[in-house]
Image: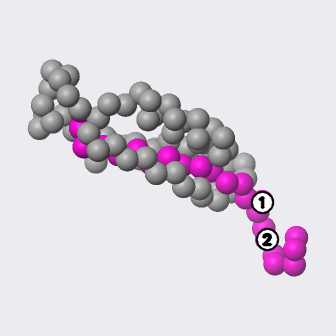
Amino acid sequence: MLGVGVERIVSLYWAIIYEDDGPNGACGQSCSTTNPWRRLYVCESEGKMRETIRRIEDDTERKNSRVTGVFHPAPFGDNEINFIGDG
């Protein structure tokens, strides 16, 4: 393949990293008792990534929310996705 000795076909996975500083406004809890969020979403296409970003931005009302979209090559056929949780 292309004369470079490629052993595996790769596809792209799109990752969304969501972070914030805690709840926004009167939710019955203070920011000191509610942890900030750090979440990872993995999508199989750019379109799904954009749709998920819109949904996250519409559904969350927390302080200093940050959404980052990135892509990463992953081996074709690998279906194990590691989840990165809080902390």
Residue holding disc 1 = 9
Measuring from the top left, give residue 83's x and y in whole percent.
46, 44
Q: Say which residue appears at 17% left-offset and 23% top-offset.
A: 26
Proximity of marks 2 and 1: CB atoms separated by less than 8 Å: yes
Q: Say which residue appears at 44% left-offset and 30% top-offset.
A: 58
Outermost residue toward the bottom?
A: 3
Magenta-drawn stretch contains 2: yes
Magenta-drawn stretch contains 68: no
The magenta span reads: 1-23
**Considering depth in this image, is 58 or 73 the residue closer to the camera?**
58
| Colour mode of the rendering | one colour
Q: Say which residue appears at 41% left-offset and 27% top-offset.
A: 59
For label 2, count other residues whose C-alpha is less than 10 Å away and answer few (under 14), some (14-19) or many (20+): few
Residue holding disc 2 = 6
Amino acid under disc 2: Val
Amino acid under disc 1: Ile
**Considering depth in this image, is 55 or 4 the residue closer to the camera?**
55
Measuring from the top left, give residue 27's x and y in whole percent.
20, 22
Outermost residue toward the top?
A: 28
Q: The N terminus is located in which quarter?
A: bottom right
Measuring from the top left, give residue 16's x and y in whole percent.
50, 46
**Considering depth in this image, is 45 or 11 the residue closer to the camera?**
45
